[in-house]
Amino acid sequence: MKEEKEEPKVLCLKIPPPVVDDDDDEVVGEVEIQDEIIRKEMTTATKKAAKRKRGQHECGVCWRMCTTPSLLATHMRIHTNEKPYECDVCEKRFRQSGGLKRHVRIHTNEKPYECDVCEKRFSRADSLRDHMRIHTNQKPYECDVCDKAFRQYGHLQTHMRIHTNERPYECDVCEKRFRESGTLQSHMRIHTNEKPYECDVCEKRFRQSSDLRSHMRIHTNEKPYECDVCDKAFRHSNALKIHKRIHTNEKPYACAVCEKRFSRSESLKKHTRRWH
């Protein structure tokens, strides 16, 4: 008879779970957070690598992705302020050839974009787009402080300076500051005495186009501002504003000495000269 071989016995030991205290929990938590950060960084790096593989090119300054090397080169001019395209009329320079092309239309007076409602023409497509909002009354840009809405984003930016009191444009003669570049430009004519707007009837000259328009109403006798109480009409909006104080009895100008109030600043000045 064959002897039966005795199979070896296997001893199983029951190992208790490790004891983990609160400090170990914190360490494990930190490790998990670090692993998550590394995972996200690797995912981001993988995505960027995939974009580059698809033919996209990344700006080394702001990490913007461009689809072609030429677009990346054009984008880099924002950071370098390189402006290789120069207008041969006024020597103003541009980063892109398209910017120069649009600018040249100022000199040629070319206006290829026409409004199909009022037939007004424009030199730029975006100017036509902004103009169309006059007809649609669309005002997509809203102030998040006072809820006032605007047709153009630039108008909203300018408006926001009312709330922030930002005045980025400074006169280099008297250091007075302005919210808008156009207001500074008009102000500079006080120092230069430049009056580029001339009346073609009496040849009187003005610093601002709005002053010329107001002046022309003397010759045309146009009075577009009418009081909704007594129907009296005025050439200027400010004249109507002052007139309406007759009906409202508003007197915003007060004498600093006797506190007597007036509806017009001129009346206050006369009072001060006469009595004080």
Image (spheres, rainbow, N blue to C red):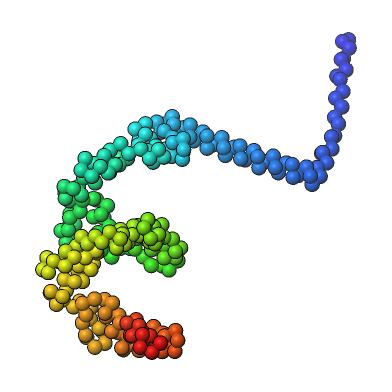
Image quadrant assignment for residue 98: top left
The front one of 171 and 237 is 171
Give residue 38's position: percent from left, percent from top.
61, 37
Q: Quadrant of the C terminus?
A: bottom left
Residue for point 34% across, 32% down = 70
Give residue 246's position: percent from left, percent from top.
31, 88
Would you say 25 lies left or right of 228 here?
right
Image quadrant assignment for residue 34: top right
The front one of 216 and 28 is 216
Q: Quadrant of the N terminus?
A: top right
Residue for point 41% across, 57% down = 168
Give residue 249's position: percent from left, percent from top.
35, 89
Q: Is residue 142 visible?
A: no
The front one of 150 and 157 is 157
The front one of 11 and 84 is 84
Residue for point 57% across, 37% down = 41
Would you say 8 lies left or right of 162 here?
right
Position of residue 114 relative to residue 71, above or below, is below
Residue for point 46% across, 38% down = 61
Q: Residue placed farthest to the left in the image?
A: 201
Position of residue 268 relative to residue 46, above or below, is below
Position of residue 113 relative to residue 76, above or below, is below
Q: Is residue 120 visible?
A: yes
How many discs mark residues in the rendered view? 0
Give residue 267's position: percent from left, percent from top.
33, 85
